[in-house]
Amino acid sequence: MPHDHAAPHPHRPDQDGPLTEAQLTEIALRELLIEKGVLTPAEVTAQVTQMDARSPANGAAVVARAWTDPAFRARLLADGSEACREMGYDIGTLNLIAVENTPEVHNVIVCTLCSCYPRNLLGLPPDWYKSRAYRSRTVKDPRGVLAEFGTELPRGMTVRVHDSTADMRYIVIPQRPAGTETLSPEALAALVTRDGMIGVTRL
């Protein structure tokens, strides 16, 4: 059956270029580990599948619980890693720090060196998060960057920029929207967006 190239979906360029040094290193290391019996191809596939299954829904569930459970919120702010493990989210050995937006303070996350990101809770980072423009400009002009996302903050509000590192990740707890007092945790989680947990937008 012929493929309709006029279909309205984005076309990504073919990846026909030579492999990068990092890609060649990954292939060589993976094949060596399999050859030595440390891993099996099935285990590699299972791990990739597990990583691909991670999505912002995990982080949204954490935020919704923080909104509805004051004791959990306190634990999350005190030790984000342990609080997320409590909910069944394995974040490994990383130090996860939860920061909370308030009427006085707005938090935004960036990784100035590369693209460090809480993938276990938010899935894969968006392309713009990895871009040089976002990484360099957010620390210099956070209000300007936020405005490009449509986030206009009051003049008197403090903006705090948090720089992720190889062993430290951040997640923003957005302000709970007004009028949601009667919603269930599931309904609240549906309101939480990936960009809200990065801090570039407000809910």
Image (cartoon, helix red, strand yellow):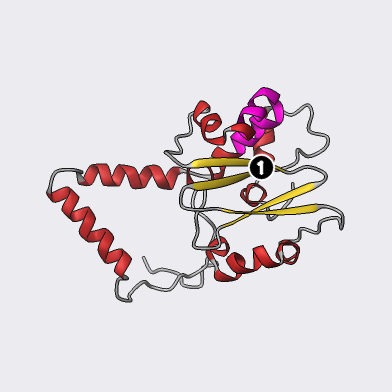
Q: Where 18 falls versus 171 (above or below)?
A: below
> Mark 1 packing: few (<14 Cα in 10 Å), some, or many (20+)?
many
Residue plotted at (23% across, 43% down)? 42
- Is 50 positioned to the left or the right of 113 in the image? left
Q: Residue at x 82, y 37 (%)?
A: 178
- In the rendered view, would you say 101 is above or below 135? above
Quarter of the picture holding the N terminus: bottom left
The secondary structure that most of the magenta stretch takes on is helix
> Circle 1 sits in a helix, a strand or a loop, which is it?
strand
Q: Position of residue 69 (x, y in %)?
A: 68, 24
Residue located 52% across and 26% down the image: 86
Q: Quadrant of residue 53?
A: top left
Determine if the magenta segment contains residue 73.
yes
Number of numbered discs on residues: 1
Instruction: State the residue position of label 1.
Output: 99
Amino acid found under the numbered disc labelled 1: Val
Q: Which residues are magenta?
A: 60-76
Q: Nearer the viewer, residue 202 or 162?
A: 162
Above or below: residue 35 compared with residue 25: above
